[in-house]
Image: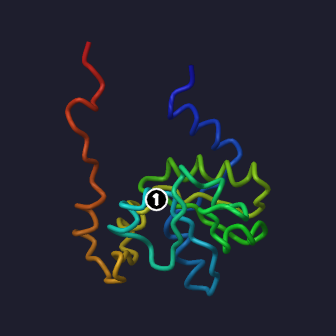
Amino acid sequence: MAGYDDLILDALARVKEIMPWDLSRSMAEGNRPLLLDVREPSEFAMLRIPGSLNAPRGVLEQSCEWDYDETLPLLAAGRDQDIVVICRSGKRSVLAADMLLRMGYSNVVSLKTGVRGWNDYEQPLEDAAGNLLHADSADELLAPKLRPEQRKPKG
């Protein structure tokens, strides 16, 4: 049986990853890829890379197609555009990028280390109102919040 990390390793055979500094440099040079954040809406509302678009993984496929309540026109019309898929740590984005490739998108990469790495590289993050967040505040929002019952049993 394949576990979560096994699924990610399998997808990495097909998905290219870029580092936050690569994305930052590319954007500074004037490149404007579609920044597709696949985190849940509540995560996206807390903080995000400015200019990113939210399509949660749970509705990603419908967001890519016309005639669905979840259709995102920029995404549905952009099978040939440059897309950088983003999540919190860079795992969900790999799985989402793999799905986009399977759906015929041709220029898709995943942001390795996600918004956590983007923040560690001291790149701008904003809240839902467009206010820039200080890196320390963002660190607190991005920290894992595991409850004891979510941890692997010992023994």
- Which residue is at the far left? 148
Image side of residue 80 versus residue 122, left or right: right
**Disc 1 residue crowd, few under 14, some 14–19, many 20+, Cα 10 Å:** many
Q: Quadrant of residue 109?
A: bottom right
Identify the secondary structure beneath mark 1.
helix
Quadrant including the C terminus: top left
Q: Residue at x 62, y 81 (%)?
A: 32
Image side of residue 49 versus residue 133, left or right: right
Q: x, y (%) of residue 66?
A: 73, 65
How many discs appear?
Answer: 1
Q: Residue at x 29, y 77 (%)?
A: 133
Q: Quadrant of residue 147?
A: top left
Q: x, y (%) of residue 104?
A: 79, 56
Say which of 18 and 68 sits in front: 68
Visual colour scheme: rainbow
Image side of residue 122 versus residue 22, left or right: left
Looking at the rendered structure, the kind of residue marked 1 is Gly
Q: Residue at x 61, y 63 (%)?
A: 69
Say which residue label 1 marks.
114
